[in-house]
Image (cartoon, coloured by chain):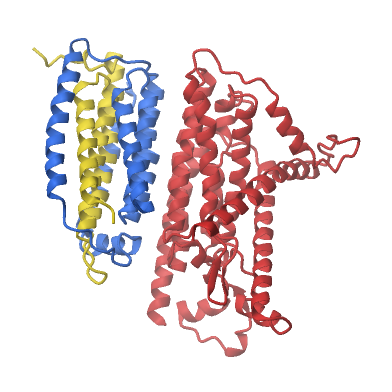
Chain colours: A red, B blue, C yellow
Amino acid sequence: MPIEVIVKTVFILLVMVVGLAPVITWIERKQSAVMQDRIGANRADIAGITVLGLLHPLADVFKLLSKEDVVPTGANRILHGLAPIIAAIPALIAFAVIPYGGIYVFGDYKLSLVAADPDWGLLYIFAIGSIATYGSVLAGWASNNNWSLLGGLRVSAQMISYEVTMGLSVVGAFMVFGTLKLTDMAIAQDQTFRLLGFLEVLFGLPVPVWLDWIRLPAWGIFYQPLGFVMFLTAIMAENKRPPFDMPEGESEIIAGYHLEYSGMRFGLFYMSEFIEIVVIAGLVATIFLGGWAVPFVSQETIINIISGAFNRDFATALCMIVHFATFMLKVLVMIWLQMALRWTLPRFRYDQVMDLCWKILLPLSIVNIFVTGAVLLVAKGSS
Amino acid sequence: MSVPIILFYVFAALAVTSALGMVLNVRNTVASAMSLVVTMIALAGIYLLLGAYLVAVVQIMVYAGAIVVLFLFVVMLLNLRSDSFAPGRQWLVKTGALLLTLVVLSELLRLFAVGMPPTPAEPTGFGGYRQVGIALYTDYVLLVEMSSLLLLAAIVGALILAKRRID
Amino acid sequence: MLPLHHVIGLSAILFVIGMIGVATRRNLIVVLMSIELMLNAVNLAFVGFNRLWPGTAEAPALDGQIFVLMVITVAAAEVAVGLGIVISLFRNRDSVDLEEVSLLKW
């Protein structure tokens, strides 16, 4: 029903993009300040009331809007102006398939909290990641500047290398959950599994029944720990955030492909990086951290507990809110993790980045697929 | 005039416009490459409308996301600037285009007059990754193996051709 | 339903545009891109015809889409080797203009 899709799209844009992305710039400033034992930016105020620096994102927007828009001579004006838009669009449309809630049944009406749920949802994310290359590459070319060209070449090499690893590292999770639909992946993580079950499945050792209470939530990170690490690395490299920010290395090539952009055009590049942080957090939360599922408490249990006191529809609505809050909590944890990684690790060199992708992550992801396939074969064969 | 049919005409117009922009644009090679990307994305949209979901995603991932990036890479590496139509070729463009348009138009008019059989309903799971994957690895597994050999040959060939001489 | 003869017509138009590009452009890279456009037009025809005869849910006939996947693979390999040729040509002659690399013409 189109009105439903429009409402969900508006909600996503309001909450995630307009609401969360500026807050993330504040989180970055404050988290880096806490990690580096300083106070951070806290002087932006309205009539003398500073709110811990929460007005700084607003001040940033005003500053960027009021700057002069410089287009270098000899640069292609159309491509120069088009590049920030092409960089921002993939970050925005990737939100369409990320589920921030499950499927709730209100009488005879099924509400699923995801804007679009195609059967090939995860492939859509990879396609979007492929398109995202063009914004940065065009920015590097269209600026008529040697440093920008170097940055553009570096960024195209980095992004197309890490796309391959990004795809292969999730194949293990795809094999375990058996579906590419992100909603179904999150629903499959809504249960628990016996921790010692692998002994019975792989080695045939009988597990005593009284040890069955040791259970873990069936999250992707417990099924695929190596896949989680590799996917996080690859998708952070796609986002060009430090430690993978050698295309825009400030000390080497003077901000690379960002160089000739000022004012709101640079603001668009900057914002698209932060929006992609939210996309990465949402994706990793959905595939590996159980999405909107509360650990150890399945959706049925929550609804049954609440409908002891209220009626069923209200219980479902309350469960929806609980799930959404859990999802946002996991997203915030992933954002914190990305910020911590950004402010801890120094920048990788160009050859180190390429080595990491082709010589370490790619063979490891193929080994991961092989081992996952072998374990699944033995598990399906014995059950 | 349902939404899929309107979307098809929008994508078709976009594809033809950007294809013309790619071929007729003489001044800027990078702009030609970007027009090619727009054509490929429009074609991927048409594949989605035709029910070929995996093919559409593979088109964007491989064609628009890797092959044209390779073109852009080479254009940036060689720092190619502007171009022009060949000096003696202006008449060739005009007569060739006219002839081809006439031929194609006549064939198309004949096709539209005859029409095609009505489109059957789309079977469940058609064009999804499951069925295409099963078909690839049961009926067409030889093709998959041969394409892996082909890609290996292409990688080795491209490396040798583009490597600097180690003298 | 989607008018399939319009899909085939679009495929023909794109193929013709690609042919014009191959025949008249001087820049070798644009000629390669026009070849890619022709391959895309052929892919569209394959997918269109596959939609016309999709088989059933139990016995799907996905030959057209398998063909398209193979065409995309071959196009990727061809672009890689073709651009390698372009780079080595540029290194030797400092130009990718087809009017200047015409040694075989008499």
Count of all numbered marks drawn on residues in the image = 0
User: In which quarter of the view is residue C57 placed?
Assistant: bottom left
Residue at the far front: name it: B1
Which residue is at the front of the view, B124 or A286? B124
Q: Is residue B36 above or below residue B56?
A: above
The residue under the point 16% across, 45% down is B112
The residue under the point 61% across, 76% down is A298
Residue at the far bottom: name it: A209
Q: Position of residue A333 (x, y in %)?
A: 68, 56
Residue at the far right: name it: A48
Q: Position of residue C21 (x, y in %)?
A: 23, 26
Q: Position of residue A54 (x, y in %)?
A: 80, 42
Q: Residue A337 vs residue A139: left or right?
A: right
Residue at the far top: name it: B87
Q: Is residue A357 above or below residue A321?
A: above
Examine the rendering and report whether any part of residue A245 can be seen: yes
User: In which quarter of the view is residue A23 placed?
Assistant: top right
Which residue is at the front of the view, A97 or B100? B100
Q: Position of residue B41 (x, y in %)?
A: 37, 41
Classify the position of the C terminus of chain A by image quarter: bottom left
Examine the rendering and report whether any part of residue A234 can be seen: no
Q: Residue A335 vs residue B120: left or right?
A: right
Which residue is at the front of the view, B78 or B17? B17
